[in-house]
Structure formats: C-alpha cells, structure tokens
Image: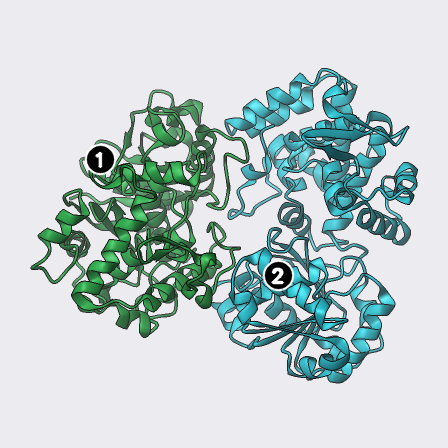
Chain colours: A cyan, B green
C-alpha cells in the first residue's frame, strides 16, 4: 500500500512542473460526478472536453458545471462532444482522461477498451469509481495503461467536499501517483488521502457502516430519535439519516450491499441493509431526489417516516425522551469546551445515551480495526472522515475523550477494542492519535 | 534596546464559519490560545500577560472587554494582566507593538498576543457598514453601500491619474494571491474556483462592488484568530535550551514601523499631491522598520506579507516597499517577481485576498506567517531559504500603518 505522505513545498513544486496538464477529457460528463469533476478541472486546465453519449447530453453537463461554479471561464475552457464522433480524437490529445461513467464494471471496461486504443502512452487515466476495484478495472491491459491508471475518487459534490481518495493499482507508477496527488491538492484544492484497493476504499467503508447502523436503529427508534442521538454533538454537521436522504437510498444500498458481499469483518451485521428500506425503495422512496426518505417536507412542515406503516408524521408531533444531556454538551461546545462536553456525553444516563455511545464506539472500533487494511495507518481514515464526510475523525474523538474513556465506551458497547487503544489506555501516557497541526479539530464539534 | 523573540503560534482555519458551528467568540479565542500553547510547548503558567487585537466585537458579537476573555481560556490565566487594542484592520499589529514594548521595557518575559475577529455573524451589507467605522464614518461611510471597496477603488483611481493603471495588473495580483492560498492549509479560499480569466472577467460572476474594484479584487469576510508568543531574551534562552535549538534560530522582531495618517482618504491624497508616493506615511512605516532592522532596502528581505485588503492596496505596497520606482508597480507584476519563486515574493500565504481577513487577526497572522517562513515551516508556501520577512498591516484607507521585520 502507498504511504499517506504527500510531497510538500519545493519538492511538490518540482513534481508539479514535471508534467503539463493542458488537456483533460471527462467521460460521462453529464452525470453529477462527471460535470462536477469537469468543473474542478477547468479552474486549473486550459482545455477540458466534456464527453457523453450525445453532444446534447455533454452540453447539459457543461451548463450544469457553469451554474455550479458560476464562472464564465468554465465555458471558455470547455468543449463538448459525443463518444461516437469525438472520443478517439479527444483522448489522443488528452494528458489526463477522467472516467465518470455509471458504476457498472462492463460499461467502464468497454469504455477503457476504446480509451486504451486511442490514448497516448504518457497520458494518465483516472477513474472516479467509488466501489469498483482499480486492479480489476485495468486487468489484462497493456503495461502503459496499467502504469498510468489510478482511482481518483472525488466525493459528491466535488466543489464542496474536498476529501479525495487516491487509489493506486498494483502496477501504477509511483511517479504518476505523486503527480496526481500534488496536482489535485495544489491546483484543485483537494485534501488527498491514499487508500488501498479495498471494497468502497476507506471513506465509504467506514462512513456507510455508521450510516447503515443508524438506519437499522431507525426501525425501532424512529428516524427523529436516531438523528437526535447521533446528531451534531457526536461530531458531524449533518445527521446520519438526513445524510442517507441526501446521498440517495439507492446509492446507499449499492455501497452497503457491495461492502456486505465483499467483506466479512467483525462488524458484518451492521452492514446489512435493513429490510424495510428495500421494501420502501420498491415503492419509489429514494430520499431527497424523490422528495421522500427518512424525512420529507410538506410546505414548511418537516415530516418523518413511520417505519412500520410507511407513512409520515410531522416531526413536531413525535414525542422524544428527555435528552437534556445533549443541550448540556452543546452549551460547552458553544464555548469551545470540547473535552468537557464529550465527558458529559460519556457520563449521560439512560438507554438512549447508551445507544448513541454504542454507535460512536462502533465507529471508533471499526475505523481502528481497518487501519492497515484500507489505509496504511489510522491517519488516512481520519483524514477522509474529516474531509470526505465532515465527521469528527475517530482519532479526534479518542484524543478528546482520552484513550481510557474510549476503551471503556467500546467495552460498554460490547465491541472489540482495538489493540492500539487498549495499549494507550493501559500505559496512561498522554498521547494524541491525530497529529495534524493544520487541521483544527474544533470544527468537528458542532454545537447543537 | 532589549530584543523581542517570536516563539511561534497558532492560526485557526480561516475557512471556518463559527456561526454555522454555532460557536461563541470565546470558542475562537480558546482554540487559538490552546492551539498555540500546545504547538509551541509552552505551559499556561509561563504566560505573564496577554494583548488582544480586535476591531469590532462590540458590533459583530455584542461583546466588549475582550482582554478579559483571555482569562477564560485556562485556570492559570486568572489574574493575568490583559488588555485589548484597536486600530481597525491594524488592530493585531498594535497589540504586537504593545506587547513588544512591554518586553523591551523589561516588564514581562513572555507575552501572548491574540488577534481575533468573528465576522460571519451578520449579513454582508451589515458587515460592510461595520467596516465603514474604520473610515470617518459620518464623512465617508454613512449611507454608502460597501464603503471600503469604494475607498480603495479611489486609491486605484489616484494611481491611474498620477501614473496610469491597467486593471489587468490588478487581476494578476488577485490570481497570485488565490494561487498561493491553494498552498496554505489555513487559507479561506483554498478550495475556491479562481483563475486569471475569472479575475479578469467583467460579467456579474465577478461583479463590480466599488468603482474599479470587483469581487476578485477584494479580501474576504473571515472568522479567525491567531495567537503568538513574544519573549524576552532571558525566556527565549531558556526556551531554546529545553527545545534543543539554538537561540540564534529563534526569530526576532528586528524592526518595526508605525504611522498614522489623517482619516479621510481625500485628505491623505491632498497631503501627498507633491510627493512621489501616494501614501507617504505608509512608505515611512516600511522604511522605518527596515532602518531599525539595519536593512538598506527591499533587497535585504526575502519576502513580504502585505495588506492586500484590495488588489489596489497590494499594488500600492509594491512601489512603497521600493520594489519598483513609484508608479511602476506594474513592472514587478509583469516580471513575475511577486510569485513564491520570484525575486520579491509577496503574500506566499495568499494574503488577505486568499488567506482571508479576520480584521483584528490579520497583523498577528502576518507576523506568524513571517515566523513560519524564516523557520522553514511554511510547507507548500515556503519561500526557499527565507531568513527575513517584512509585514505591512494597514488600518482604514491607509490610515494606521504598522510593519514588522521578522528574521533569524
């Protein structure tokens, strides 16, 4: 696995000047990831070609990119075309080919057949896939393709979420990896995290485990209580079920089904899609894109799903137990007293607080157990959870509560304690797991 | 004169919106001070006094008595002498001047200086009016929408009148600041969409906000705080020993400059009509700092952190620093001298346009960036081999000017 370290300063500038990215071709430029990524490229690259099945669709992508970025330079730097007429010529001229087709192995494979024939030997080929294996996608291709092929996983929407996973294949040239790393960071303003070629890579593997566990809990607790319990005070701006609604239930299912099928780790059961979600999806419930998910709006009224009946009730009519401890935590966060706030959470009485701790304990335990598997160390997972999900990274939570408290919380939840945490707790020595001075950990503790 | 050492410090991420995080001013203060203590490995018990630079928390946050908030950060701070300093956008530098004067006078050995401003508490229009109080409000700002872009647009017009000024040079200044900001992990605009064509664009995507000033010419509305520690030679000696470094490797404030002009822009221009420099008091601030540092001219410094509240203010700084003859700043832009690898790098951090401009924090941020440069800790925006950096921090329309030379 590649290390997390990315070159900086003068050595980064040297790497940057080692190649010229004058022309980028974006394949699938009509989709959200396609035009969002293409828009990013136009700020740093003079010629960006938006390609889609038809020129009309590519034009739609360009129009969406312009309205997303609100700069006329998107248009002046872009051209559009279709696969039939324009692909070979555009790819032959491109320094970077960026694939953002639908998440289907065979469709991507067929496209890479054409790209491989048309591309120059020195061009880089990147895929934005969030779930398919990088090694499988380039299997059987020529040396030059495999050396220049990698995963560049932007998160949606790319102009807002900066966290980006960089996934090298077994044969990717390390110089290409370094270049794409520095270029994306310095020219595109990305936060780069190198991950292994494992199912759903790092961010979605850990993130969707937590989201799915929240969805499982909603079956008995209801969405309102779950989003309150795993809300901002646990280290996130957007609550988990509102996140699934935003992402789309179909995307959620694709990710957790993929991870559930391809992995078998200690938290396997939490990755199983709840049956009620599958049932509701059959009826067309897909989250915000269909106007209804865990939540929906009726004018100014926010409604919440009643899982048993499939109907919706105004959030204001749903009775909640006493969760006064959450207000106490938020008040301390409001003044920047994060350590004190989190201790209130850890000491809160009641079954609900215990359930909230179980989800957070699961997040920490799962993330630390994935270190060495999906990223070289926990730091890679920390960085993508911060910059990709806008969640408090697992190490930040451990540092803020202290390793002994973290271990106690994981034990209380009956979950496996990562060895590195039990060692840190036993030693009693003060240590910080998140040592990234440029990242303010306070930003993850949202007050209320 | 006794020496003033800079032990480093901590800057909050200027991209953060503390109102969205639902946080109070005190949280911003707390994170910057605790961050600085941890980063510099200084015990709270060692801090003897604190100076807070802030422009307008009374307006933005309905909160005064800001020096006292320092004591809320740590129990060990209870009882410390603290105070707050205000000189509009130069507030942070005034706090540094006060702290360093106390060290020079031998009163204290270790001082905290905090520059801080929380600005995203109000709408753009309301904030623009608050900023108008940095001018002579009744004379220049009352009833004017976004008064400051208009005042600095007039600075550009004055250059145009005396020497000629093409907007393409202003666009290039904007472009460089935004590009540098992409290298700075604490810069507000590091993820924003920007390139030269966008800075040059004359459509509503880059709307005019005051005369020739367009959005791309402006610095940002920013929430941010920066805490730095200043020390006497006695403390710095002890500190170097325990950090395992040489005293000579700890940067010092080698020179300072400080002038205040009349408030109204029209009066400044009237006073300078016979002068080669448009803002001669700003020039004097820069040269007096150089002189105190024993530096003959701009060739004696390796980089500049200047006050680009608008591209016109950086355009002014270029000739006022002596990089070119008065009125010829465009030559430095044209020659590529201002880039990080250039002959006279300006704002490797991204400056106020790229890094952001939490008004009261800016002077302290500039000093901390100077410290990072001369100790080789500036990461992607490091100027190779920088040993001496000069700052220029301006309050109002060129009214209060402060400059520091920091170096090893």
Label at residue B184: none
Q: Residue at x 23, y 59 (%)?
A: B157
Quarter of the image with the C terminus of chain A is: top right
The percent position of residue B325, horizontal first and vertical second, equals 18, 69
Mark 1 crowd level (few <14, some 14–19, many ≥20, 10 Å Cα)? few
In the rendered view, tell whether residue A144 sits above or below residue B6: below
Quarter of the image with the N terminus of chain A is: bottom right
Question: In this view of the protein, which residue sits in the foreground, B330 or B122?
Answer: B122
What residue would you read off at disc 2? A65
The percent position of residue B334, horizontal first and vertical second, equals 32, 73
Mark 2 crowd level (few <14, some 14–19, many ≥20, 10 Å Cα)? many
Q: Residue at x 24, y 54 (%)?
A: B154
Helix, strand or loop under label 1: helix
Left/right placement of residue B381 relative to residue A306 reads left
Chain ID of residue with mark 2 = A
Which of the 4 quarters of the picture holds residue A295?
A: top right
Would you say residue B302 is visible in this rendering? yes
Helix, strand or loop under label 2: helix
Would you say residue B252 is visible in this rendering? no
Q: Which residue is drawn at 23% across and 41% down?
A: B140
In the rendered view, tell whether residue B313 sits above or below residue A19: above
In the rendered view, tell whether residue A116 sits above or below residue B380: below
What residue would you read off at disc 1? B138
Left/right placement of residue B161 relative to residue B72 reads left
Query: What whole-number distance in Å separates the C-alpha atoms at marks 1 and 2?
Result: 44 Å
Chain ID of residue with mark 1 = B
The percent position of residue A232, horizontal first and vertical second, equals 64, 32
The percent position of residue B261, horizontal first and vertical second, equals 15, 45
């Amino acid at each position: 696995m590649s290390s997390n370290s990315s070159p900086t300063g003068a050595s980064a500038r040297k790497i940057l000047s080692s190649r010229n990215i004058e022309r980028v071709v974006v394949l699938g430029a009509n989709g959200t990831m396609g035009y969002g990524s293409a828009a990013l490229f136009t700020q740093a690259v003079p010629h960006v070609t938006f390609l889609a099945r038809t020129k009309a669709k590519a034009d739609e992508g360009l129009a969406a990119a312009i309205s997303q970025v609100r700069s006329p330079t998107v248009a002046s730097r872009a051209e559009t075309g279709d696969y039939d007429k324009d692909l070979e010529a555009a790819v032959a001229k491109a320094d970077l080919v960026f694939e953002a087709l639908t998440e289907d192995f065979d469709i991507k494979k067929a496209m890479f057949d054409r790209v491989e024939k048309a591309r120059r030997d020195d061009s880089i080929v990147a895929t934005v896939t969030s779930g398919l294996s990088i090694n499988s996608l380039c299997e059987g291709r020529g040396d030059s393709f495999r050396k220049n092929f990698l995963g560049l996983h932007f998160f949606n929407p790319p102009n807002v979420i900066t966290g980006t996973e960089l996934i090298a294949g077994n044969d990717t040239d390390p110089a290409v990896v370094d270049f794409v790393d520095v270029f994306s960071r310095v020219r595109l303003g990305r936060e780069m995290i190198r991950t292994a070629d494992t199912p759903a890579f790092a961010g979605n593997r850990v993130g969707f485990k937590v989201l799915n566990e929240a969805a499982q809990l909603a079956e008995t607790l209801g969405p309102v209580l779950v989003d309150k319990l795993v809300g901002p005070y646990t280290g996130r701006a957007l609550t988990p079920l509102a996140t699934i609604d935003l992402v789309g239930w179909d995307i959620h299912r694709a990710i957790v089904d993929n991870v559930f099928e391809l992995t078998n780790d200690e938290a396997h059961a939490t990755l199983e899609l709840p049956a009620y979600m599958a049932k509701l999806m059959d009826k067309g419930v897909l989250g915000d894109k269909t106007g209804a998910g865990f939540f929906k709006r009726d004018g100014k009224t926010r409604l919440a799903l009643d899982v048993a009946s499939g109907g919706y009730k105004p959030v204001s009519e749903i009775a909640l137990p006493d969760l006064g401890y959450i207000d106490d935590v938020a008040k301390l966060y409001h003044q920047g007293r994060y350590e004190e706030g989190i201790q209130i959470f850890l000491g809160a009485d009641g079954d609900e607080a215990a359930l909230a701790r179980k989800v957070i304990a699961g997040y920490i335990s799962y993330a630390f157990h994935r270190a060495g598997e999906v990223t070289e160390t926990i730091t890679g997972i920390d960085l993508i959870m911060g910059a990709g999900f806008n969640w408090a990274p697992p190490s930040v939570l451990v540092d803020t509560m202290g390793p002994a408290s973290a271990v106690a919380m994981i034990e209380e939840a009956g979950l496996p304690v990562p060895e590195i945490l039990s060692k840190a707790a036993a030693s009693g020595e003060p240590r910080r797991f998140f040592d990234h001075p440029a990242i303010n950990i306070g930003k993850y503790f949202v007050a209320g | 004169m006794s020496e003033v050492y800079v032990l480093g410090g901590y800057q909050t991420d200027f991209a953060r919106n503390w109102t969205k995080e639902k946080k109070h001013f005190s949280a911003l203060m707390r994170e910057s001070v605790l961050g600085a203590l941890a980063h510099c490995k200084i015990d709270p018990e060692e801090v003897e006094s604190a100076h807070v630079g802030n422009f307008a928390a009374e307006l933005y946050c309905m909160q005064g008595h800001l020096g006292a908030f320092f004591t809320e950060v740590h129990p060990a701070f209870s009882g410390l002498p603290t105070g707050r300093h205000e000189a509009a956008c130069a507030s942070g530098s005034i706090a540094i001047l006060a702290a360093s004067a106390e060290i020079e006078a031998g009163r204290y050995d270790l001082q905290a200086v905090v520059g801080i401003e929380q600005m995203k508490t109000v709408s753009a229009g309301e904030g623009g009016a608050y900023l108008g109080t940095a001018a002579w409000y009744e004379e220049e700002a009352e009833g004017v929408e976004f008064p400051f872009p208009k005042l600095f647009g007039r600075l550009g017009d004055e250059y145009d009148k005396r020497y000629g000024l093409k907007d393409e040079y202003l666009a290039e200044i904007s472009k460089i600041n935004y590009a540098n900001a992409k290298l700075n992990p604490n810069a507000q605009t590091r993820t924003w969409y920007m390139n030269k064509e966008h800075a040059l664009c004359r459509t509503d995507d880059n709307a005019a906000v005051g005369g020739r000033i367009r959005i791309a010419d402006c610095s940002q509305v920013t929430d941010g705080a920066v805490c730095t520690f200043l020390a006497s030679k006695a403390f710095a000696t002890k500190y170097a020993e325990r950090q395992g470094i040489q005293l000579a490797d700890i940067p010092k404030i080698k020179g300072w400059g400080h002038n205040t002009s009349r408030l109204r822009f029209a009066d400044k221009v009237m006073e300078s009509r016979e002068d080669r420099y448009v803002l001669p008091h700003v020039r004097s601030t820069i040269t007096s700092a150089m002189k105190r540092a024993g530096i003959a001219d701009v060739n004696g410094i390796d980089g500049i952190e200047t006050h680009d509240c608008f591209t016109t203010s950086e355009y002014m700084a270029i000739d006022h620093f002596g990089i070119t003859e008065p009125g010829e700043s465009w030559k430095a832009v044209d020659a590529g001298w201002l880039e990080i690898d250039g002959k006279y790098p300006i704002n490797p951090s991204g400056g106020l346009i790229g890094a952001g401009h939490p008004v009261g924090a800016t002077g302290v941020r500039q000093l901390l960036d100077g410290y990072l440069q001369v100790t080789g800790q500036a990461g992607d925006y490091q100027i190779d081999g920088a040993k001496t950096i000069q700052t220029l921090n301006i309050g109002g329309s060129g009214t209060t000017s402060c400059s520091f030379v920091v170096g090893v």
